[in-house]
Amino acid sequence: MTTPIYECLINKNTSIKPIWFMRQAGRYLPEFKKIRKLNPDFIKLCLDTNLSNEITLQPLRRFDLSAAIIFSDILMVPYGLKQQVNFKKDFGPLLGEINLEEISEAEFIEKLKPIYNCINKVKSNYLIKNKNLIGFIGAPWTLLVYMINKKSPKKNIDSSFFNNKKLIDKVLEKLEKFLIIHIENQIDNGADIIQIFDSWAGLLDRKDLPKYIYEPTLKLVNFIKSKKIPVICFPREIKNYREYVENVKPDAISIDYKIDPNIIKKEIKIPIQGGLDPKVLLSDKENLKKEALKYLDIFKDHPYIFNLGHGVLPETNPMMIDYLVKIVNDY
């Protein structure tokens, strides 16, 4: 199969600029809001194969995108490991106590089976023809933060976070095992790219990066590559993207909107994704065009997938997304 994203990732083609958006499926689309209103329990919604399939495909019906990303959440893995996960309105995720009891591979797969069934269902839809289907996971560090902190850390983590080294090591070991199972089941059901989201990469000091980010993420990257599937990593707000790329060795690196794209272009040779500030979509068309062209011009001679530097914001007007897609596709 050849697709615009594969052309970029595998063949390093610079003449084509594929486009998709983090959080393209969901909260800003009126058709999603209708479904969400009737389904207030977010975890149950992620585990409804038919509704997740519909939500995954909604943006492809509206926009000429290069990929679908499965409608799910990185916290489905803690849920699969029997830790309680709830989403509180205007607050975010709230997790229960860590469950350290043994859980079998079969139990874990059974709990998350509707997600794998959804991927399989999306893959067979005509809307995905000649497009990629992106599966994803949260990186071990980011999931560790949620599982121990039990909520979003926002700007920093408490120094007491690292007190229980035994617990941290146990959770990381468990995550490595079950993230590989989660990746494998997504790939086996039709995901043809995996993205690793390390949302809290920016919270760590440089001295802690090898233990908590580089080493555990590299193991997952190597596993994905062994399955002959490209892997994109998004270590949001990490202090040094070049060092991350050298240590983790993804096929492409997704960048946040706080980093200067000119520096990234100079320092990184592999394909690059993203960068545009999602808030630009809340401005006017003139400003949106100017900012979009800035990224397209900077990465003109570099393999580049157009995306944002974070997820689409809930208050985004779908017409602005449509306008942006046309700018990129006409470039």
Image: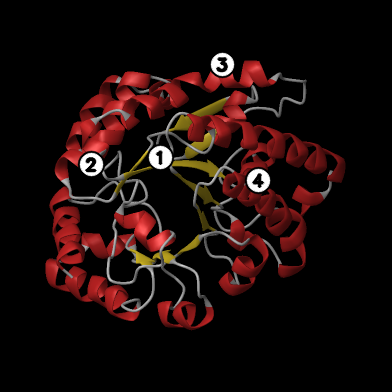
Query: How far is disc 2 from disc 1 in space, using C-alphas?
Result: 24 Å
Q: Nearer the viewer, mark 4 or mark 1?
A: 4
The residue under the point 72% across, 20% down is 103
Q: Which residue is mark 4?
A: 140
Query: How far is disc 2 from disc 3 in space, using C-alphas?
Result: 28 Å
Q: Which amino acid, mark 3?
A: Glu
Which color scheme does this rendered protein use? secondary structure
Query: How far is disc 4 from disc 1 in space, using C-alphas?
Result: 25 Å
Query: How far is disc 3 from disc 4 in space, using C-alphas?
Result: 21 Å
The residue under the point 28% across, 71% down is 15
Along the polypeptide, which appears first: circle 3 or circle 4? Answer: 3
Along the polypeptide, which appears first: circle 2 or circle 1? Answer: 2
Relative horizontal placement of residue 11, taking residue 270 as reference (left or right)? left
* Residues under numbered marks 2 and 1 in contact, where contact means CB atoms less than 8 Å apart: no
Relative horizontal placement of residue 22, taking residue 316 as reference (left or right)? right
Q: Which amino acid, mark 1?
A: Asp
Q: Which amino acid, mark 2?
A: Pro
In this view, 115 is above or below 328: above
Q: Which numbered tag is attached to residue 110? A: 3
Q: Which residue is mark 1?
A: 90
Please rate how many residues cluster around mark 4, counting C-alpha atoms within 10 Å: few if below 14, some from 14 to 19, many from 20. many
Q: Nearer the viewer, mark 2 or mark 1?
A: 2
The C terminus lies in quadrant? bottom left
Along the polypeptide, which appears first: circle 3 or circle 1? Answer: 1
Q: Which numbered tag is attached to residue 59? A: 2
Question: Where in the figure is residue 82, as x and y percent of width and height?
Answer: 64, 22
Quarter of image, res 9: bottom left
Question: Where in the figure is residue 288, as x and y percent of width and height?
Answer: 20, 68
Please rate how many residues cluster around mark 2, counting C-alpha atoms within 10 Å: few if below 14, some from 14 to 19, many from 20. many
Q: Which amino acid, mark 4?
A: Pro
Callout 1: SS: loop
Question: Where in the figure is residue 20, as x and y percent of width and height?
Answer: 31, 53
